[in-house]
Image (tube, rainbow, N blue to C red):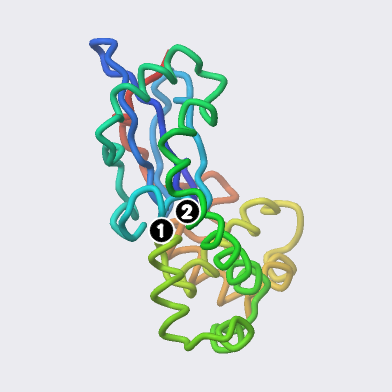
Amino acid sequence: MHAPTTTTEIVLSVCCTGRPELVVLGPRTRALYYEPNGNPVAPRFRLTAGQARAAFGMPVTEFTDQVVPLPSADAGQLAERWLAAPSRPGAVLEPYLAAAAPAADRETRWVDAAAARLAGGTPIAAVADDLGVSERHLRNRFAAAVGVSPKHYARIQRVRRVLDEIGSAPFAQLAAQAGYYDQSHLGREFRQLMGVSPAAFAAGRRPAPRTCATTKAS
């Protein structure tokens, strides 16, 4: 199972011919259920929100719920170097990310400030006021950097908090701890993002898995 996530990653994938390639795994707005295929987990490098927006040169919303080739003329060379040094993705990708570093650092600081407030349950209007921007500016800039709207970001963070603790306490308690209004609020959002109710998920009754087509890295 792949839970909803607000992160963007660069993944090293190797096809059946042995040719490596780099793909971008964008934010995931809903859970995906796959059959295990026996392949090892492909090496990946998680980008900060600022890095993703600056390095790609386009809004991260273009990658949301997508797996696409890395938008770089040097992607093939980077993939070969990463395959040769699989434990050092940061060093391999440094040339690709370096040119965008100043802009990435500024954007990361801004997005981190917004994300921390949103994850803590601060209303969007209050977050915008704290950062000295309009709500419209907050929504547009945040979505371009993260790949999801501020509202959906908060929803994903709440669900992930429940996933971390599911089975450890009654659902009413989990709902309160995660920032839901009540247990019914938790149930609605959980179904929307996970495809089943919290009780069904906890009992192992989950949507039928699909065959994973992701290629492996070795």
Q: Picture coordinates of residue 108 (x, y %)?
A: 55, 59
Amino acid at circle 2: Pro
- Asked whether the viewer can see residue 41, the reply is yes
Q: Do the residues labelled 1 and 2 touch (CB within 8 Å)?
A: yes
Amino acid at circle 1: Thr
Quadrant housing residue 70: top left
Residue in the foreground of this view, choosing between 195 and 178: 178
Residue in the foreground of this view, choosing between 207 and 121: 121
Q: Picture coordinates of residue 1 (x, y %)?
A: 47, 41
Question: What secondary structure is marked by label 1?
Answer: loop
Q: Residue 29 carries which label?
A: 1
Residue annotated with mark 2: 4
How many discs mark residues in the rendered view?
A: 2
Reply above or below: 31 against 15: below
- Give the residue at x 41% y 54%: 54
- Give the residue at x 52% y 41%: 46
Q: Picture coordinates of residue 182 (x, y %)?
A: 64, 79
- Asked whether the viewer can see residue 6, the reply is no
Reply above or below: 82 against 10: above
Quadrant housing residue 212: top left
User: Is residue 69 rendered to the left or right of residue 182?
Assistant: left
